[in-house]
């Protein structure tokens, strides 16, 4: 069965490692991430953006697919199904459909409105045992058409949201969705440290986890980051492996155009990358 992310993140925070949130798009993504985390004995959070939810024909389909796959693959590690960057309406819809964890991203609202809506979503989700992530400040870059300003979070605003009883807190600290530019200034560890201090040890979430150097990942974890979101990197390794397969003409040999063969190199690449990440994040062997 799917579990809330609360317990796995509290354990991660206490144990100084982070749990990966790997975003899914379809059956292949879901299967390879689950297989990798089972092999590594790592807890896992499957992230679903609103766009990916629509692509997979709706939250109900996603819940049914993930629940059935966890069972049919014999997955024993804790699995949370998490709405990524949910809107106010999307959060309610995903909760209704059976997601076990929800992000309400009200970062584009004026703070008072973000606070009010976050409070309501937290109460609603907690009444069903579902964990909640909220966002303060903004993640830079674009994900699924959602563009963030990259505004660095105000630690005092973080404290106010943390005090609502949110289970995990995402804060803009110079992190960016998608590929990082050459001249990226890096994560703002001063602000991250201040946020952890004023939120008295709340598990923090690092968005834009693709392409951050390992030393910065480790430092972020040491400052309270307990969940790291990875989306773009799995898309890049999948596309790269698929491109190589096609460019080598393998799709024309034998029955190489059979989707089960055509998509296999990309699937293997996703699994290998997830295994790398759970090692880097330190969640390997923690389930
Ligand atoms: O919410 C999802 C993540 O923040 C993904 O970021 O695509 O840069 O890995 P990424
Ligand atoms: Zn994100």
Image (cartoon, grey):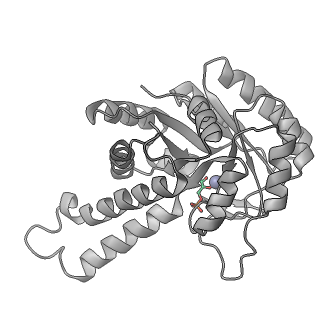
Answer yes or no: is residue 137 visible: no
Q: In terms of depth relative to the viewer, which is nearer, 125 or 20?
A: 20
Q: Is residue 222 above or below residue 12?
A: below
Q: In terms of depth relative to the viewer, which is nearer, 211 or 119?
A: 211
Residue 37 occupies quadrant? top left
Where does the image place residue 243, in percent across and percent down from the top left? 33, 76
Residue at coordinates 77% horizontally, 28% vertically from top-left?
165
Q: Is residue 199 above or below residue 267?
A: above
Outermost residue to the left? 254
Q: In the visual, does 11 lie left or right of 171?
A: left
Q: Quadrant of ligand 2?
A: bottom right
Where does the image place residue 137, in percent across and percent down from the top left? 82, 53
Where does the image place residue 197, in percent across and percent down from the top left? 84, 44
Residue at coordinates 73% horizontally, 64% vertically from top-left?
140
Q: In the visual, does 154 lie left or right of 240?
A: right
The C terminus lies in quadrant: top left
Outermost residue to the top? 127
Residue 160 occupies quadrant? top right
Residue at coordinates 33% horizontally, 71% vertically from top-left?
241
Where does the image place residue 190, in percent across and percent down from the top left? 84, 60
Answer yes or no: is residue 266 visible: yes
């Amino acid at each position: 069965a799917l579990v809330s992310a609360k317990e796995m993140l509290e354990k991660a925070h206490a144990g100084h490692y982070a749990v990966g949130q790997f975003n899914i798009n379809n059956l292949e993504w879901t299967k390879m991430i689950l297989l990798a985390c089972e092999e590594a004995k790592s807890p896992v959070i499957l992230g679903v953006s609103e766009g990916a939810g629509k692509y997979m024909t709706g939250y109900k389909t996603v819940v049914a697919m993930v629940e059935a796959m966890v069972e049919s693959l014999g997955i024993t590690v804790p699995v949370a199904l998490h709405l990524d960057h949910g809107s106010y309406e999307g959060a309610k819809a995903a909760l209704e459909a059976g997601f076990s964890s929800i992000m309400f991203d009200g970062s584009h609202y004026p703070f008072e409105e973000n606070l009010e809506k976050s409070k309501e979503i937290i109460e609603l989700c907690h009444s069903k045992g579902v964990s909640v992530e909220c966002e303060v400040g903004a993640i830079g870059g674009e994900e699924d058409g959602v563009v963030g300003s990259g505004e660095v979070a105000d630690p005092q605003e973080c404290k106010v949201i943390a005090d609502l009883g949110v289970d995990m807190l995402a804060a803009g600290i110079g992190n960016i969705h998608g590929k990082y530019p050459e001249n990226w200034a890096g994560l703002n560890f001063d602000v991250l440290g201040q946020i952890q201090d004023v939120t008295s040890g709340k598990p923090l979430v690092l968005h834009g986890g693709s392409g951050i150097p390992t030393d910065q990942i480790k430092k972020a974890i040491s400052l309270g980051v307990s969940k790291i979101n990875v989306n773009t990197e799995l898309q890049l390794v999948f596309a790269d492996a698929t491109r190589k397969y096609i460019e080598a003409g393998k799709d024309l040999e034998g029955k190489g155009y059979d989707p089960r063969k055509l998509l296999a190199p990309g699937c293997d690449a996703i699994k290998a990358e997830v295994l790398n990440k759970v090692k880097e994040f330190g969640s390997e062997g923690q389930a």
